[in-house]
Image (cartoon, helix red, strand yellow):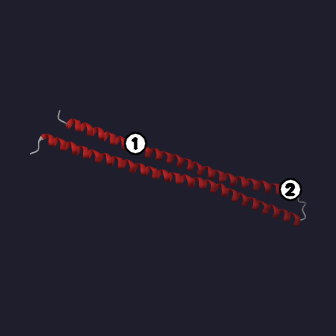
Amino acid sequence: MCDPVTIAIGQMAMTAIGSVMQMQAQKAQAQFQAAQMQQQARIAEYNRTVAENDAIAAMQWAEVEADAVDYRKRQVAAEAQTLFAKGGVVINQDTPLKIAEDIELAGVEDRLKVLYAGEQKAAAARSRGYGYTLQAQNYEMSAKNAIESGKLAQYSTMIKTGKSLLDAYPT
């Protein structure tokens, strides 16, 4: 039969080995959680980039559409002048002048509406991008917190093991 000291030493060794294994598992879990958070941060950064590209695309769309409005306005104005000329109407006075002015104002108004719509879409996309930036920062902070939480769990295990070994040591 084993003497009590040998049994006590064996128990302390098993406790220490179990604690080391538990600490390794806590570290691995913390690293895994941190890696997950960092992956989420990268996804949020990607989404931010997509939102920025959406903002650029919205402004480019608005410019192209505004140019198309200008082209249609010029076509309508040219057609009106052609019809006035065919009808023998004096172009730069009275009603024809008022009609030309109305065509120009309507064209400018339509152009501004299109540009404003593009700016609104771009602003919404930039706002989404900002939200993704904050989300990425939050995930990065969570990754750091996971590592620190793992360290605290390891320290806690070490302290509990130390206390357990001290309590088991015969005085």
In the rendered structure, the answer to whether residue 152 lies left or right of residue 78 reads left
Task: Tell me the residue at 90%/62% (across/down).
Answer: 89
Q: Who comes first in sequence, dot 1 or dot 2?
A: 2
Q: Quadrant of the rendered structure where residue 157 is?
A: top left
Residue 16: percent from left, percent from top? 25, 43
Between 7 and 93, the one lying in front of the other is: 7
**Residue at x-position 52% and y-position 51%:** 45
Q: Count neighbours of disc 2 (C-alpha within 10 A) and say few if under 14, some if 14 to 19, many if 20 or more.
A: some
Q: Distance between the residues labelled 1 and 2?
A: 76 Å
Q: Quadrant of residue 170?
A: top left
Quadrant where the N terminus sits is top left
Residue at numbered disc 2? 97
Q: Which SS class for mark 2?
A: helix
Question: What residue sits 88% from the left and 59% below the top?
Answer: 91
Say what amino acid the circle numbered 1 marks: Glu
State whether residue 166 is above or below residue 69: above
Assign the C terminus to one quadrant of the image. Answer: top left
Left or right of residue 98, residue 132 in this image = left
Q: Is residue 41 above or below residue 72?
A: above
In x, y percent, where is residue 21?
29, 48
- Front of the two marks 1 and 2: 1
Q: How crowded is mark 1: few (under 14 residues within 10 Å), some or many (20 or more)?
A: some
Q: What element carries label 1?
A: helix
Residue type (three-letter) at the residue carrying disc 2: Leu
Q: Residue 148 carries which label?
A: 1
Which is more toward the observer, 68 or 35? 35
Residue 18 numbered tag: none
